[in-house]
Image (cartoon, rainbow, N blue to C red):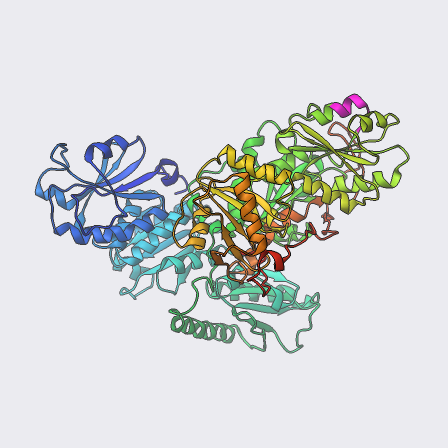
Amino acid sequence: MMSSSFNIFRVGISFVIMCIFYKSAVDSLSELSPQKYFSTLQPGKASLAYFCQADSPRTSIFLEELNEAVTPLQDYGISVAKVNCVKEETSRYCGKEKDLMKAYLFRGNILLREFPTDVLFDVNAIVAHVLFALLFNEVKYITTLEDLQNIENALKGKANIAFAYVRAIGTPEHRAVMEAAFVYGTTYQFVLTTETALLESIGNEDIENAHLYFFHCKQVLDLTLQCRRTLMEQPLTTLNIHQFIKTMEAPLLTEVTEDPQQVSTIHLQLGLPLVFIVSQQATYEADRRTAEWVAWRLLGKAGVLLLLRDSLEVDIPQHANVVFRRAEEGVPAEFLVLDDIDSLISHVESNVHVEEIQEDEDEDTKSPNMDVQDDEVAETVYRDRKRPLPLELTVELTEETFNTTVVASDSIVLFYAGWQAVSMAFLQSYIDLAIKLKGTSTMLLTRVNCADWSDLCTKQNVTEFPVVKMYKEGKNPVSYAGMLGTEDLLKFIQLSRISCPVNITSVQEAEEYLSGELYKDLISYSSVSVLGLFSPNMTTAKEDFTEAGNYLKGYVITGIYSEEDVLILSDKYAATLPALLLSRHKEGKIESIPLANSHAQDIIQIITNALLETFPEITVENLPIYLRLQKPLLILFSDGSINPQYKKAILMLVKEKHLDSLTPCWLNLKNTPVGRGILQSYFDTMPPLPLLVVVNLHSGGQVFAFPSDQPITEQNLLLWLKKLEAGLENHITILPAQEWKPPLPAYDFLSMMDAAASQHPTRKDPECTKETDVQENDKKQHEDKSAIIKEPIETLRIKHWNRSNWFKEGEKSFRHDNKEL
């Protein structure tokens, strides 16, 4: 179950239907000749081929259903095409009439399986059969109770089981189970049957409907005991199965001490209510046993939490022993007095039933994202679910091993939750990081699954997932606040090898530092090195620079020089002390910036601005950074690398200060495909490229396009911008004023990216040490006292456009923060 000999993504799949050209077939099916098709086959890659000799109306219905299957199959990495048999080419699959009624599944040029086309009767059957054939290791088909018991016994103490009964292969319910197996097949053993006798033997006599059971076998260590079974009571759809499994992955019982109205769990995100069992110190053990029993009874229907009244800051009515909170936002919690468990279960189930009825009534009108977090992060986890992760490259920590491990060695600790999609997506990036650092880093990479060790995570002040903290002996832990990706975390770890500004002790060392020689292995992670120059008696200025360097640790290389001969450097680089020297390694330039009367916040802002590129390529990752400038974007859209002449023209305008009120940038559609959707939202249809536009996100939402019949030259661009300033150009569209928000606040990825751009982790101690410095400290338990300094000043106070000059038509002010381009 856990290892598949057919890895869909690593191997790759093509779903190719070969048939004659039929006019009613849709254009979305790519067409190939037999020779072309077989020339594209590669070892290890799979395809499904359907051959036809001549025009045949009998294939039209099949092709229509196949067209419907194109999109869902592509969602699973399976491409769809048709191959036309032609007289000039011969193939044994373009043979007899009876062969026209079969589809052939290949891997490379090896035939794996034949499908009669009558079993591929609709889109559900096509998707179900294809996935069923490819997931032969993940989904076990059984016919007897003995088969089920053997699988159950084999997996006790090892893994859980998803057991499904469907009335027939190829039904919508069968497809839903296969799609779930595609996502969760390496985590759970899927078992499938169509035998009514088997369903009845486990106590379910409803053979008219499909059913799904979750067998909790992983926690069963005694082979004589039966695995607990939880029945999914909703219809078998892909979404319902996903929701059901998510509730099975969530903690059975969680202890909380906060206001029930402020608690957020996966259950609320899935549209399920929360039940709080109110407890107190004197009856804690009995209350916990009761809560666990209630949690098993309500598993899949509601989240159950143990609310500790003694440590609660919010008053709970003294008579109340249960708090019930509905999933709807804004509905106040109910304080109940229930005498027994059955009445509690009845109350919850009756309310859940009402919510389900209301959902059904509103199904046609409500947004599909109202109740379920439907984001691309979860999709990434699904798509990579077969990717084997070498978890052995990181050390799994427990409550018993945590303190001894982080004391014994400098450690990076990932705190995550095994049931959360964002955590699992980042775990993949974290393992990629371990692969990159294998054998090269003295930093120990570790991880804590907070679903298993919630108390440990609470002690370490972990309140959201995922979180990365850096632990060094004698220092307070540092929380990583960057983007959740391999490269960003790798940069943070590598640059954190130098804590605070490095103390440079000679002019020669300073020159090596500025040239990049001193830390040449880190230059790839920081394109700018910052050196502060101070006279020995400039105590306050040095303290401010040290604070700024500590704030930016892990994000840029900083150094400080304060020797008696500092004038040698200040004279060479025409710097008035105190000053910053910014060494831009890619450009080979060193510039000086005076620091007179500059406090730590000002220095941070100067350095942060210096890290921004003059004409950057906009990506999903860096867009929030440039949006924070609060200036209109001058974007050059290009399908690949930009013309050097265009770049030269724009950089010249930047140099001449004509673009100070804009943020010039470019977007490569090959690197950032979402740009196509952006352009289509501007123009309705895809315009020819390259294309230059001005997008005023923060004051009016107008979008202006540079005339496509004019070449992008310095002179033409300057004249166009002056027309914009004079209000002589018409906008092509106005972006709507609503904010771009996630479906649920628990996954506010834009806020996370904003935090990455505006916050940098720091430590409270200001000492500056080189990588080679060693400090002796007593080993002690690490309790998280990490601090992330709040933004001390508004980021980049940039003067907005004078709207009376630039946009005569946009008199009404809108707020466009965090809005989609």
Q: Is residue 698 visible to the viewer in this orientation of the structure?
A: yes
Q: Position of residue 139 (x, y in %)?
A: 33, 47
Taking 28 as reference, is 645 above or below it?
A: above
Residue sitting at x 48%, y 65%: 271
Taking 579 as reference, is 161 above or below it?
A: below
Tell me which corner region of the image, top left, top right, bottom left or bottom right, holds residue 278: bottom right
Number of marks in picture = 0
Tell me if 797 is positioned left or right of 818 in this view: right
Give the magenta-colored segment's residue range.
504-511
Viewer-closest of 737 and 165 = 737
Residue sitting at x 66%, y 48%: 758
Q: Residue furthest top?
A: 508
Q: Position of residue 437 (x, y in %)?
A: 58, 31
Q: Position of residue 274 (x, y in %)?
A: 54, 67
Tell me if 15 is positioned left or right of 748 in this view: left
Tell me the quarter of the image containing the N terminus: top left
Viewer-closest of 586 and 238 = 586
Magenta span: helix, strand or loop, mainly? helix
Viewer-closest of 269 and 84 = 84
Q: Is residue 506 magenta?
A: yes
Q: Is residue 225 visible to the viewer in this orientation of the structure?
A: no
Q: Is residue 145 magenta?
A: no
